[in-house]
Amino acid sequence: MRVLVVGGGGREHSLCWAISASPLCDALYCAPGNAGIAQDAECVPIAADDIEGLLRFATENAIDFVVVGPEAALVLGLVDRLAEAGIKAFGPTAAAAMLEGSKGFMKDLCAKYAIPTAAYGRFTDAVAAKAHIEQTGAPIVVKADGLAAGKGVTVARTTGEALAAVDAAMIDSAFGDAGQELIIEECMVGEELSFFALVDGRTALPLVGAQDHKAVGDGDTGPNTGGMGAYSPAPALTEALQAEIMERIIEPTVEGMAVEGAPFKGVLYAGLMLTDEGPKLLEYNVRFGDPECQVLMLRLRSDILPALVASCDGMLETFDLRWSDDAALTVVMATVGYPGAYAKGSEIRGLDAVSPENAIVFHAGTATENGRLLANGGRVLNVTASGATISEAQAKAYAAVDMIDWPEGFCRRDIGWRAVARGA
C-alpha cells in the first residue's frame, strides 16, 4: 500500500513513525513533512492546505491511501476531492469537519441531540455580544467560531477581559474571518480530559485516554497554546466514565451527524470538562490531537494502518486495538516567545545523545540547512518517553530534554503533574 500523510508537525511525525512500521505499507510519503519525518517517510514540498497540489501528487504517484493530519485540509474538503478521484482517505468530509470548522455548528448539534455542553449564544454583532457579556457577567468564555490554530478561545475572569476579547476578534480581526462570529458560553469548572474515538460513520471505537497541557507556563499558567505536553493514560478516565462519555456524548454525535446527512468518518477528538454534573463537551476536533497523538502512538501495540483503513471503509464494528500497559508522556520544546512572536532559524544540537530506548523525539517544526538542524516553528520538538508509571515516563522524558542543546528553546517542567500528584 502506497500511503501519503498530510501535514508537517509532531502529530504527523508520530503517525508516520507508526505507519512506517506496518507490513502493509510499501511506500510512505509526507507533505510537507519536516526534518524528523524525513527519517521515516519521503517528504514532498506540498503545503497541507494545497488541495489541488495534494490531489495531483496522489493521482500521479498512485497513492492508495491518504491520512490527513491537520484540520484545515479537512475543512477545505481534501477528503471529498480525493474520493472524487477514487482515492481512499482517513478523515471526515468537509461537511462532517464542520464539527471543528464551526463551533456554532457544533453547539447547535449538541442542543438538537441533547449532548451535554455549556450554555451558549452565537453572535455576529459586537454590540450584541458585549451586551450579553454585561448581562451575564464573568467568568465567561469567548470563542472564535472558526479555525484559529488553537488560539481563538479566551477564558475571561473579568467582564473587562471578555469585552476586550470581543474587540480583539470582531474589531481588530485577531483571528481573521474565524472571529467574525463568536460563541459566548458559560465557564465550566472541573478537570479537562481529551477523549478519542475512531469512527466509521456508524460505529465509534474508543481509544485510550490522554490529557494535555494547554497553558504555556508551569502550574497551567499563562496564555493557551496548541499544547505544551501530554500523557496517557489519564487517571481520571475510569471504565465507568468512558461508558458514560460514549453513551451521552460520542454515540449521539455519530448518530446525529448521520441523521444530518454528514456521516462522520475519521477520529473524533472530544475536549471534555469533568464537572460535578458529569462530563460535558468543551469542543470537538476532527483529527488527532497534537501532542496527544504522540503518546497514543507510543502506547499502541496494534498495526495502525488497518485501523485507519477500517474507519474509511465502515468496518470498525468488529475491530479491536491493543495497547501497552505502560504510560507515555511527551514534553513539547518550543521556541522562546511562543505562543507570541518568535524567531526561526536557531540551531538545535544534541539529539544524537537521546537513545531511542529511552525516548523518541518527534519533530514538530524543524528544517535542515547545510547539515544543521534548525527550529522552524513555535512548537519544535516533542520529547516522548514511556514507563511503567506516568512518573517514570516523566523522569525519562525530562532526562532526554536535558540532553538537548538548544538555548533558544524552552519547555514546561511539570508535564503530567496532576497525574503524578495522584501517585500515577
Image (cartoon, rainbow, N blue to C red):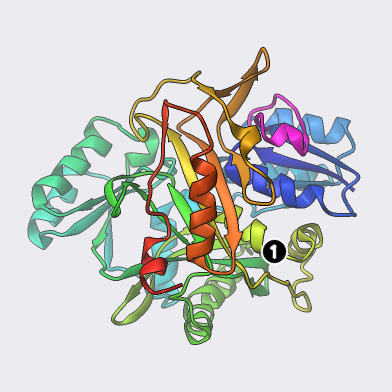
Q: Is the magenta stretch mostly helix, strand or loop?
A: loop
Total labels: the figure holds: 1
* Image location (x, y in percent) of residue 316: 75, 72
Closest to the observer, 223 or 167: 223
Task: Tell me the quarter of the picture where residue 282 sits.
Answer: bottom left
Q: Can residue 73 be seen in this view?
A: no
Indicate whether 377 appears above or below 299: above
Instruction: Name the spot of residue 342 as percent of width and height, x first.
Output: 38, 24
Residue under the image location 70 percent in, 24 percent down: 45
- Name the amino acid type tagged 1: Leu
Report which residue position mark 1 lands on.
Answer: 300
Residue 307 appears in the picture as rendered: yes
| Residue in front for this viewpoint, 5 or 341 | 341
Q: 147 and 122: which one is in front?
A: 147
**Left or right of 381 on screen, residue 414:** left
* Image position of 132 (left or right of 49): left
Looking at the image, residue 140 sits to the left or right of residue 350; the answer is left
Q: Is residue 95 above or below residue 256?
A: above
Image coords of residue 169 (percent x, y): 27, 38
Looking at this view, name the residue that lies furthest to the top: 370
Dot 1, how many residues are within 10 Å of its Cα: few (below 14), some (14-19), or many (20+)?
some
Q: In which quarter of the image is residue 35?
A: top right
Q: At x 44% / y 41%, what residue is drawn?
A: 149
Q: Where 316 falls versus 358 (above or below)?
A: below
**Over which residues does the magenta segment extend?**
33-48
Residue at (44, 35) in percent of width and height: 334
Name the spot of residue 1 as percent of width and height, x first.
90, 48
Residue 38 belongs to the span the image colors magenta:
yes
